[in-house]
Image (spheres, rainbow, N blue to C red):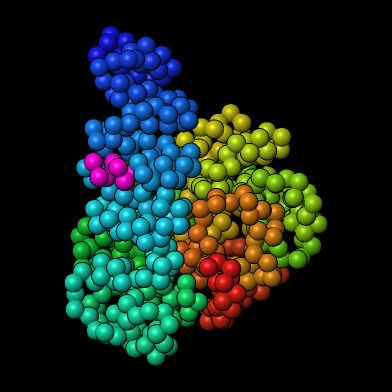
Amino acid sequence: MPPAYWRGRRLQRGQRWQQAIDAYRAALPSPDDAEVQFRIGYACEKQGDLPAALAAYAEAVRDAAQAPPIRQYRLGFVADALREWEVAATAYRAAIAAGGTVSNWFYRLGRVLERLERWREAGDAYAQAIRRGGDRPAWRSRLFRTCCMTGDWGSVSAHYRRDEAVSADMAALLETPAPELTQDRVAAALAAGEKSGALPAEWWQSAYVRLFNLGRLHEAYAAKRLAVARARQQAELLAGSTRHRLDAAAACIDQADYGAALELLQPLTGGTDATAEEAREMAAGACLMQGDIAGAAALWRFTEADRLFRRLIEGKRVAIVGAANSGLEAGTEIDSADIVIRTNFLNPDTVAERAALTGARTDISYYNFAFEEKNRARILEVLRENPLKAVVLHQAGYGQASAAYAGLLPVRSNYLFRGLYGFTAYAIPRILYDVLRFRPAEVRLYNSDFFLGKDIHYQGYLKPGDYPDHDPEFVFMMSYHDILRNFLFTRRLQDLGLCSGDAVCEAVLALSPEEFLDRMTVRVGALRPASA
C-alpha cells in the first residue's frame, strides 16, 4: 500500500479524522482501492459526514463477491442512519450472506425490513437474531410487532414451546387463526395454562400481545398473569444466578409481594457495578410501592447532575402536564405551580395557543429517546430561543445525546421504575417516578387521561408529524407499554398520597382495574381499524 495509506492509519488512530481522510484520498489509486475507500468511509462516518461515508462504503463494496462482511455492514449501518432503507436492507443481507453471524446484524436487518413493511421477512430476521443472540425483550417486542401485522404466530409458538408437548387447548392461543379463536377456545387455553407449567413466561407474554392486538383485553391480561407467574417460577428455580434473582424479584413486585422482592434483592444492593445499581433501583421501587418512602430514599443514589436538579424540585409544587386534550381550562392553576414539566417540548407556539387549557409556562422538559433523536436539531433551536431550567433525556443513547445539550442548559438522564413484568412506562408515569426521588412538596398531573378521552394525545400540544414515522401503531404500543400497568402504577402512587390529578385524571384513576379494561376495550376497538 502507498505511504499515504499508512499515514492515514496513524492519523485515524489519533482520531484526526479529516487529516486521515486527506491522506487516504492521496493514496488513491492503490493496489487495494476497496480497502482505502473503506477507511475513507469510516473516517467520514466518525466525523459525522454520513453522505460522504455512504459514497465511500459503496465504492468499498463495488466488488461484492470480494467484500468482507464488515464492509457491507458499515454500508448498511450508514444507509440505515440516512433512512435509505432499501440500500440498508441490501447491505445487511450481503453482510450476512458473506458470513456475518453477529446477532445484532440480523436485528438491524429486521428493523429496516419493518420500515419497508416487509413484515414476514422482518419477522424472520428478528427470529434469527433471537436464536443467535438471546431472547432480549426489545428484540422479542419487534418480533411480536411483525406477528401482529401478518397474523401468523405459529413460528413464535414453536420457538417458545421448545419442542415441549402441550395440550391442543393451550397451543390454540397462538396457533389458531384469529377468526377461529372463539371465546370458549381462549377460556379453555387459559384454564389449561392455570393447571400446567409446561409453557414458559415468554409464550404467555406472546399470547398476551396477540390477544391485546385483537382487542380482547380481559383475555389478554389473563394470559399476562400466567406470564408473570411463570416468570417467577422460572427465576426461582435458578435463583442462585444474579440475573435470575433480579428476574424473580421483578415478578414478585408485579404480584405485589414486596417483602419477597426485597429479600431477593438485598444481597445484591451493596456493590458499585451495574448489577448493584439495577438491584438498588428495583428495591427502591419495591419500597416506594409499599409506601416505605424512607426505605426508597435510602437506596436512591444521586449524580452531580441529579443534585443540581434536586434544587429545582425539592420542596416545590410540581405540575406535570401531559399532552392529552382533557378540555379543562387548567392553565391558570398549572402556571401557579412552582415548577411546570412537559413532555417533548418542541412547539412553544402551540403551548401559547393552548395556554388557557394547559398553561403557558414550561420549566423542564422530559424527552423520549426516539422523539429526541428525530427532532434534536429542532429541539436545540427551540431551546436556544426558549431556554428552560433543565432537560431530562432517556437513558437510551444518553451519552451521545447529552453532548449536544452541554453548555446550553442543565441536562441529566431519568431513572426508570424496575419491577413490573413487561412494563415500559409512558411519559407521565415515567416522569412521575423520576420526580418523586427529588422530594417535591406536591405533584399534580394534568392532561393525562390514559388515552380514554375523546382525543388521543396528539390533539394536545404535540403534533403527529413530530413523532418518528416508523413508530408502530397505537394499539401495538399500548400492548408494548402495557397500558393497564401504567394505570395501576400511577393509581398506586396516588393511593399513597404521592400525587394527585386534575378532574379528568382523577376520574380515570378512580376506576377499578376491570372498569378500566372495559373502557380501554372500547377505545382499542375504535383504534384498531385506524391502526390496521
Q: How many marks?
A: 0
In the picture, residue 205 is in which quadrant? bottom left
Q: Is residue 419 magenta?
A: no
Residue 508: x percent and y percent?
A: 63, 73
Can residue 353 be seen here?
yes
- Relative to 179, is 380 on the left or the right? right
Q: Main secondary structure of the magenta part?
A: helix
**Residue at image coords 30%, 25%:** 34
Residue 232 visible in the picture: no
Q: Image check: 156 left or right of 255? A: left
Magenta residues, start to end = 92-98
The percent coordinates of residue 520 (x first, y second) are: 57, 75
User: Which residue appears at 48% of the width and 79% of the height?
Assistant: 216
Asked if 311 appears above or below 320 in the picture, the reply is above
Q: Is residue 97 magenta?
A: yes
Residue sitting at the far bottom: 184
Q: Could you say which is closer to the camera, residue 204 or residue 301?
A: 204
Q: Residue drawn 39% across and 39% down?
A: 77
User: At x 61% / y 68%, what residue is drawn?
Assistant: 451
Find residue 511 and report its horizontal and vertical position in percent: 59, 78
Q: Position of residue 202 (x, y in %)?
A: 31, 68
Residue 199 vs residue 82, the one in the foreground:
82
Occupied quadrant, residue 143 = bottom left
Q: Quadrant of the N terminus?
A: top left
